[in-house]
DNA sequence: GATGTTGAATAATACTATCATTTAATCGTG
DNA sequence: CACGATTAAATGATAGTATTATTCAACATC
């Protein structure tokens, strides 16, 4: 081996394995030398990979004890990588529901903040993404990407540093969320009109209206999710 | 050097410097060999430290280009370390306000979820933390710690995996937030009674009441913060 | 003159080997 | 059986070398 971005690949593999549950929290990974053999690489690369996983809260390591998986509550699930692994390997309706509840907390607040702040450039960006969504509706653009971009644009327009940072979380999770909700046959969950309501409220500085419109969109998504969860009971693991 | 957990110290130092703004986003850090000399250690340690900072989104590195600071929007500010550095070195009323708005999004939702879920063990934990707060009020316990523990307990009682993960963020940030709001002379911002209202609503399964009580507490905190921001204009940088 | 190609310099990436330190587990004693 | 000393296993740290991607500039080509 020596494929340049090798450390990243090892992080990806081991991180994925851990999140998938190959090693239970509290359990030990093989020792560094053994991991090096398993991944056909040197101990140095393994050490650097383990350090990255440590930074994400997935593992810890002490002399003699070895490298062990941390309890789940220490995992930094808001880290884009960890979140992606989690959604890829442990996708359930329950998790999706938890995520929608978080969005209910964040997005209406962000929309309201954007309406108050009136950052013209940022609002123009939202309009542009709305335009993309219309194009996508007629097949001239990617529907998933433009939908995500619209939601991200609102977070940016809020001017709240934490909301901006949430973009990564929302971005990663929406790729799964939207794919799921859209996959319900015959139902186009998030219509362009619904999104437009949010934009218009922000544009005219109507904080409450923006929050309400964002809330409505998510309430509807939750309703659909619950309906579907009831129909195909405990049917997880799609995507990718 | 050779102080055993050296890598962590180097991460702390370099991470702190970056967040403080010693190197502007886009700018380059010294080359690995130079960093090793500066921190009086080996290149290996520097490499492992840089990898950890990479995992937190603070830096990137490519052959020939060197190690460079990523634009701020790529920083994983929800990472406990990054958040702590940010609050330690860039503490402003604006940031504090942004954080309170996030809490407004999260905590009422978590309180409502806890009221619906009715996890008796988790609710007992909230009661215990409330009890600690009363003790603290009479000087028999640490006020900051018990206040934080109370809020964290609610997040756990929500049963929402993302809210639980938020504990780290809230925990880190509250250590600064509460210290600030409490430092306003003569004003005890978060009274035990206010917290008790939240607990009682959760306990009796009143989702809306719990959300409202949590919301009220935060609204009051915001009001106080704004009032203080007006009085001692642009006066940041306390704590630690 | 604009554009594309080649090649040398450079700085990071990857690997190997070795020593130091910490600490869990074991072994001997009292 | 308790408990301190010993041992050994695993990570932590260091030094040095080989490899490779990237940049930048010189050069050729259109």
Image (cartoon, coloured by chain):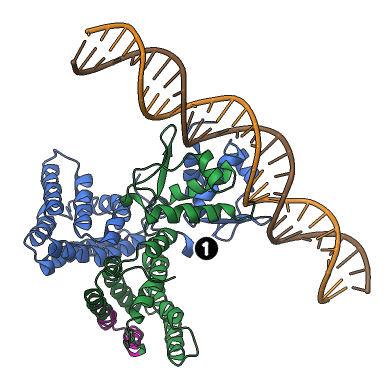
Chain colours: A blue, B green, C brown, D orange
Image quarter of residue C16: top right
Residue A219 shows in this picture? no
Q: Main secondary structure of the magenta part?
A: helix
Rendered location of residue B161, percent (x, y): 39, 65
Rendered location of residue B79, percent (x, y): 41, 59
**Between B23 and D13, the one nearer to me in the picture:** B23
Residue of label 1: A71
Is residue B166 on the magenta stretch?
no
Quadrant that contains the N terminus of chain A: top right
Crowding at dot 1, Cα within 10 Å, few <14 / some 14-19 / many 20+, comes out as some
Image quarter of residue B154: bottom left
> Could you tell me which chain the residue with mark 1 belongs to?
A
**Between A220 and B146, the one nearer to me in the picture:** B146
Rendered location of residue B84, percent (x, y): 42, 63
Q: Residue at x 37, y 73 (%)?
A: B158
Q: Residues in magenta?
A: B193-219
């Amino acid at each position: 081996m020596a494929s340049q971005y090798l450390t990243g690949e090892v992080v990806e593999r081991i991180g994925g394995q851990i999140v998938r549950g190959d090693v239970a929290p509290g359990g030990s990974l093989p020792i560094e030398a053994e991991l090096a053999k398993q991944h056909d690489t040197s101990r140095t690369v393994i050490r650097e990979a383990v350090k990255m996983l440590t930074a994400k809260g997935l593992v810890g390591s002490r002399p003699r004890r070895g490298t062990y998986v941390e309890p789940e509550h220490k995992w930094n699930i808001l880290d884009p990588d960890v979140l992606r692994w989690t959604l890829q390997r442990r996708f359930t309706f329950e998790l999706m529901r938890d995520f929608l509840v978080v969005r209910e907390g964040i997005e209406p607040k962000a929309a309201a903040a954007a309406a108050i702040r009136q950052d013209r450039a940022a609002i123009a960006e939202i309009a542009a993404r709305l335009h993309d969504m219309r194009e996508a509706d007629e097949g001239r653009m990617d529907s998933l990407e433009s939908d995500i971009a619209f939601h991200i644009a609102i977070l940016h327009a809020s001017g709240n540093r934490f909301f901006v940072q949430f973009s990564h979380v929302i971005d990663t999770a929406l790729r799964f969320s939207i794919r799921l909700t859209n996959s319900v046959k015959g139902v186009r969950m998030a219509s362009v009109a619904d999104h437009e309501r949010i934009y218009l409220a922000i544009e005219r500085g109507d904080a409450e209206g923006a929050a309400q419109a964002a809330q409505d969109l998510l309430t509807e998504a939750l309703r659909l999710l619950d309906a579907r969860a009831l129909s195909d009971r405990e049917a997880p693991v799609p995507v990718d």
